[in-house]
Image (tube, grey):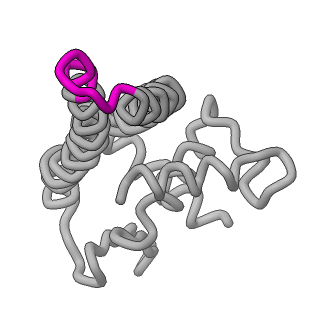
């Protein structure tokens, strides 16, 4: 869930795409980035010159948003990380199992072919797994405390007010 969102936003940040102007070294650009990532779950609106936060179309306070950000979002990201690792480990386990069977079986050619395919898959997927886990980790570790999150909310308000 989160990985797909993050990858989609990262694609849009290519120079020739709609978010190609974003430079995450700038605070307001980070605000746009977060708004885009969260838009299917969290929305931000200005009402009577105040920023209102909505979770699945229901108004929530900053404290509830803070709780969601620190707890629920991290639980969801952790599930994504676990799924990636479990899927990878499943294939790796199959590779190890087949390697052990190679000594005991007479169908060595067939097992060798399966091992080759699994080895190719593992070599191809290992760097992808690492990259995907880094993407999730960077997002999970963003705005790690209440003060940083308050600053983000201030910047989102500023961005929405003037754009």
Q: Is residue 147 visible?
A: no
Using the rendered view, name the quadrant where residue 53 is placed: bottom left
Query: In the rendering, at what x and y percent does residue 26 appear?
Result: 63, 34
How many numbered tags mark residues here?
0
Viewer-proximal residue among 9 and 120: 120
Residue at left offset 49%, top offset 50% = 6
Query: In the rendering, at what x and y percent does residue 45 appear?
Result: 44, 75
Q: Is residue 137 visible?
A: yes
Segment colored magenta: 98-108
Residue at left offset 23%, top offset 38% = 90
Point out the image quarter for the C terminus. bottom right
Please determine whether, in this image, residue 102 is positioned above or below residue 114: above
Q: Is residue 24 left or right of residue 131?
A: right
Q: Is residue 36 left or right of residue 142?
A: right
Please determine whether, in this image, residue 104 is positioned above or below residue 137: above
- Residue 101 included in the magenta stretch of the image: yes
Residue at left offset 45%, top offset 69% = 39
Point out the image quarter for the N terminus. bottom left
Query: In the rendering, at what x and y percent does residue 72 appear?
Result: 15, 54
């Amino acid at each position: 869930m989160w990985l797909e969102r993050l990858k989609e936003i990262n694609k849009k940040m290519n120079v020739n795409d709609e978010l190609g102007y974003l430079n995450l070294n700038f605070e307001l650009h980070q605000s746009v980035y977060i708004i885009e990532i969260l838009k299917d779950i969290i929305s931000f609106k200005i009402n009577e010159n105040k920023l209102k936060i909505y979770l699945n179309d229901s108004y929530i306070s900053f404290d509830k948003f803070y709780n969601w950000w620190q707890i629920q979002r991290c639980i969801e990201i952790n599930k994504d990380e676990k799924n990636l690792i479990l899927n990878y480990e499943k294939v790796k386990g199959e590779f190890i199992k087949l390697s052990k069977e190679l000594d005991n079986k007479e169908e060595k050619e067939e097992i060798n072919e399966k091992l080759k395919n699994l080895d190719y898959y593992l070599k191809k997927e290992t760097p992808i797994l690492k990259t995907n886990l880094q993407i999730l980790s960077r997002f999970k570790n963003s705005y790690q405390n209440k003060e940083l999150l308050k600053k983000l909310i201030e910047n989102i308000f500023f961005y929405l007010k003037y754009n």
